[in-house]
Image (cartoon, rainbow, N blue to C red):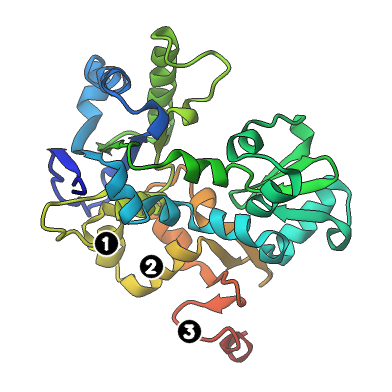
Amino acid sequence: MRRKPSLLIPYQGPDIQGKSQDVYLYLRPETNGVKVESILVSVIYNNPFLKKHVKMVYLANMPGDYILQNHIIEHHYSLNLLFAAMGKEAFTDSMRKEFSKYFAVPWEEASILGAFEALITLGLTEEELFAMRVPKENLLTFHGQTIKKVQEHFIVNYDMPAILHKNNLQTDILVMTLRITLGWKEFREMVHLMTETLVKEHVLTNTTSASRVFHYSKSPFEEIVDGQEYLYSPDNRFIDEDISFFAYMKSHGILPSFLREVVNSRIVYKLDSEGNKVENNILVATQGFNYPQALEYYRAIHSIYTVTGEKILGYDDPEDLEDLD
């Protein structure tokens, strides 16, 4: 019998005013446990300032079988998995230029492998590929995609096979939603304090990143991604509009269907002051934004990335771009 999520604090509903902001924080499968959970929560509740400005409005344990059944990991990493599967063919024009500039190798001549193809080509396991260390100059991160140079090959999103492999029926994930009235500077200071405490309690070493232990939403658009995956109620009544930032955007006249397109695509194009298209991963570009800033960014989006071509928001065919440019 498949397990269902355990609700420790049922979701208290969205706040659409824009005066607060929701951040989803969850423990990585390999570190999920009462000890780590207690450490993170104690950092908030033992600090009077944080206790005043950080409210937990949702807490749930997501069983591994529920996560697998609902393809939650695949959805969260959908763009990364696309690039890991397609490799060279997924690159946008700006990514090709950035690749050649950084590695000083013509894109057309480079041996660029998606991570899954690299496992076969190099004869490695998922964990061996993930753990393989290379000099810092052999790593490039662009639009949230990581390229690692190994021998004469360039491997796209080398970590994806290991991430999928680590999630199984036994790997539960603890998820909390923090409603904050902090600025991002103060929130990052809280994350730093959590990291220091994890080191003191020997959960982390000084050389291990806190991202190996927990994830948190770093932008309002990533809040939507995390909420779509981990917001749960027993009767499955939650929809996108129950996520605070999604509800905020809808209250400001943004069409839900268009917003879903942007979140699912993640790579977007804006026009600069001279009318040139500028390409960005919206989850990365809006890190540290509050709701009003993210709304302003969204309103400047011209089009989005798809594997079949660039697409104007709300239009079904990439060829429609020719009529509107």
Q: Give the mark nearer the N terminus: 3 vs 1.
A: 1
Q: Residue at x 69, y 62 (%)?
A: 91
Considering the numbered disc 3 on the image, is that residue within a helix, a strand or a loop? loop
Considering the numbered disc 2 on the image, is that residue within a helix, a strand or a loop? helix
Disc 3 and disc 1: Cα gap in Å? 21 Å
Left or right relative to 82: residue 180: left
The picture places residue 139, in percent across and down from the top left corner, at 73, 39
Residue pointed to by mark 3: 315
Q: Amino acid at mark 1?
A: Asp
Q: Nearer the viewer, residue 2 or 185?
A: 2
Considering the numbered disc 1 on the image, is that residue within a helix, a strand or a loop? helix
Residue pointed to by mark 1: 240
Left or right relative to 63: residue 237: left
Crowd around label 1: few <14 · some 14–19 · many ≥20 (10 Å):
some
Q: Residue at x 24, y 30 (%)?
A: 53
Residue pointed to by mark 2: 260
Quadrant of the image occupied by residue 278: bottom right
Visible residue check, residue 294? yes
Disc 1 and disc 2: Cα gap in Å? 9 Å
Assess whether mark 2 and mark 1 are in contact (beta carbons under 8 angstroms): yes
Crowd around label 3: few <14 · some 14–19 · many ≥20 (10 Å):
few
Q: Amino acid at mark 3?
A: Tyr
Visible residue check, residue 255? no
Q: Nearer the viewer, residue 123 or 99?
A: 123
Assess whether mark 1 and mark 3 are in contact (beta carbons under 8 angstroms): no
Left or right relative to 279: residue 196: left
Assess whether mark 2 and mark 3 are in contact (beta carbons under 8 angstroms): no
Q: Nearer the viewer, residue 124 or 115?
A: 124
**Up-down: is 67 above or below 260?**
above
Q: Give the mark nearer the N terminus: 1 vs 2.
A: 1
Quadrant of the image occupied by residue 6: top left
Q: Amino acid at mark 2?
A: Arg
